[in-house]
Image: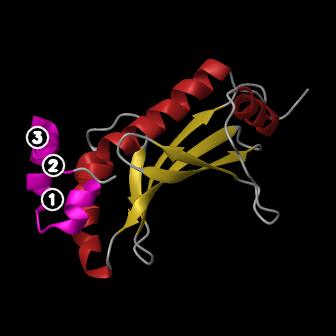
Amino acid sequence: MGTLTDSVEQYFAAEGWDVSRSANEPALRMGVSTKNARWQCVVSVDEEDGVVFFHSVCPLKASPEGRPRLAEFLMRLNRTIYLGHFVMDFDSGEIRFETYVHGVNGTIDNEVMESFVNRNIGTMDRHVCDIARVISTEIQPAEAMTQVLTGTAAAGGYKYN
């Protein structure tokens, strides 16, 4: 019987993903390119708890002075997302979208992996321009969130990539 890590690696191999792993880190890394941006993803597995973690690392970082405003926006945004959440490292300004899923008996179904991965990437792709707008302008978090909810954010034509 294989491990959960084996199942995850087999999924990415079968899907043709270009996956790498550094010698000193057990996580898998891969690049993603969508209509709005390019970024790195990190996949890690906790075999003991049977959990697969998928992180989309935002290609943008918040400046030290902009971090409190972006953190408020991300918290407001998180309330609208039912699978996963945005986090920000207050020391580095790094932003990630994190999701996780539990394997069953040391394995994970390919359909579950596909849905899990696609929802993560889709969420980052959907909101990377919103994040860019908050980072690069003086828009207030509540106003930015109103634009997200009403669909007027995209109408402004702001595009990251």
Q: Which residue is mark 3?
A: 155
Q: Please, is residue 104 above or below residue 21 in the view?
A: above
Query: Residue 125: x percent and y percent?
Result: 37, 42
Give the x, y percent position of residue 36.
35, 45
Which label was assigned to residue 141?
1
Residue type beneath disc 2? Met
Q: In the image, is 10 to the left or to the right of 150?
A: right
Q: Residue at x 76, y 37 (%)?
A: 9
Q: Amino acid at mark 3?
A: Ala
Q: Which quadrant holds residue 34?
A: top left
Q: How is the image coloured?
A: secondary structure
Helix, strand or loop under label 3: helix
Residue holding disc 2: 145
Chain-order first, disc 3 or disc 1: 1
Between residue 10 and residue 76, name the one nearer to us: 10
Most extreme residue toward the right is 1
Q: Is the residue marked by circle 2 packed among few (<14), some (14-19), or many (20+) residues within 10 Å? A: many
Q: Is residue 40 above or below residue 106?
A: below
Residue 18 is labelled as none
Q: In the shown orientation, is residue 44 left or right of residue 159?
A: right
Which stretch did the figure color magenta? Answer: 131-158
Whether residue 25 is visible, yes or no, is yes
Q: Is residue 60 left or right of residue 116?
A: left
Q: Residue at x 59, y 23 (%)?
A: 112
- Residue 94 lies, with reference to residue 144, above or below; the image says below
- Asked whether the beta carbons under mark 2 and mark 1 sit within 8 Å of each other, the answer is yes
Identify which residue is drawn at 40% across, 72% down.
Answer: 93
- Kind of residue at badge 1: Pro
